[in-house]
Image (cartoon, helix red, strand yellow):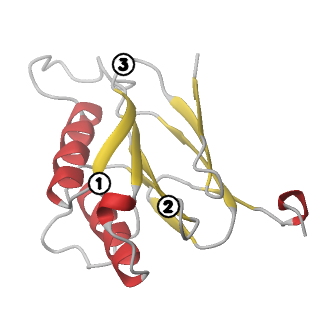
Amino acid sequence: MSDTDIEVADVYLQPGELFFAQKPTVIRTILGSCVGATFWAAKPGIGALFHAQLPTSPRTASRTSGGRYVDSSIREIAQQFDRNHVLRSEVVVKVFGGADVLHGVTDDILRPTVGSLNCDVALEILSKEGFIVVASSLRGKRGRKIRFHTKTGEVFVRNLT
């Protein structure tokens, strides 16, 4: 059986979702002020992506809040890799999103935007959890369309107009 004979699942993530794939999967999403990160471990062929809307989960949030919060999404995916005996140093991480697509909605220009806060928290928690970010496309004024292939680790990013 060749690689082209393997069926590849196709998953679209809505805001607030995450997906952990143990089989070849193409995971897609569209990010504005939300942040997403791809996680890929080549040896077992495992990949994950989250689409988080807000930077930090409230203390009252359930332990499994799906992908709604950046901090808990990263921790949940980290635990999935731990359960699959994958060292965090072996995981390739790429981070995307956090655009200021809502900039101008508030009169307080000194207040950080949700997109900016999402970026800051993502980079902080990834580092604290022992992941190394190898690539990123963060901030700016435009959203991004993400397509991640968990078999190859390839991530295709297209800026929205």
Q: Is residue 107 above or below residue 45?
A: above
* Residue 33 in view here: no
Label 1 Cα crowd, 10 Å radius (few <14 / some 14-19 / many 20+): many
Going by the numbered disc 1, the residue's amino acid type is Val
Q: Could you say which quadrant of the image residue 9 lies in?
A: bottom right
Q: Of 10 and 15, which appears nearest the observer?
A: 10
Task: Read off the residue under disc 3.
Answer: 140
How far across and down, in percent of the image, does residue 150 sit?
Answer: 61, 57
Q: Is residue 102 above or below residue 121?
A: above
Going by the numbered disc 3, the residue's amino acid type is Gly
Going by the numbered disc 2, the residue's amino acid type is Ala
Q: Which mark is residue 70?
A: 1
The reply to whether callout 1 and callout 3 are in contact (CB within 8 Å) is no
Q: Pick out the residue farthest to the bottom.
A: 83
Q: Earlier in the sequence, mark 2 or mark 3?
A: 2
Secondary structure at numbered mark 2: strand
Q: CA distance from mark 1 to mark 3?
A: 18 Å
Horizontally, residue 44 falls left or right of residue 138, namely right
Quadrant housing the C terminus:
top right
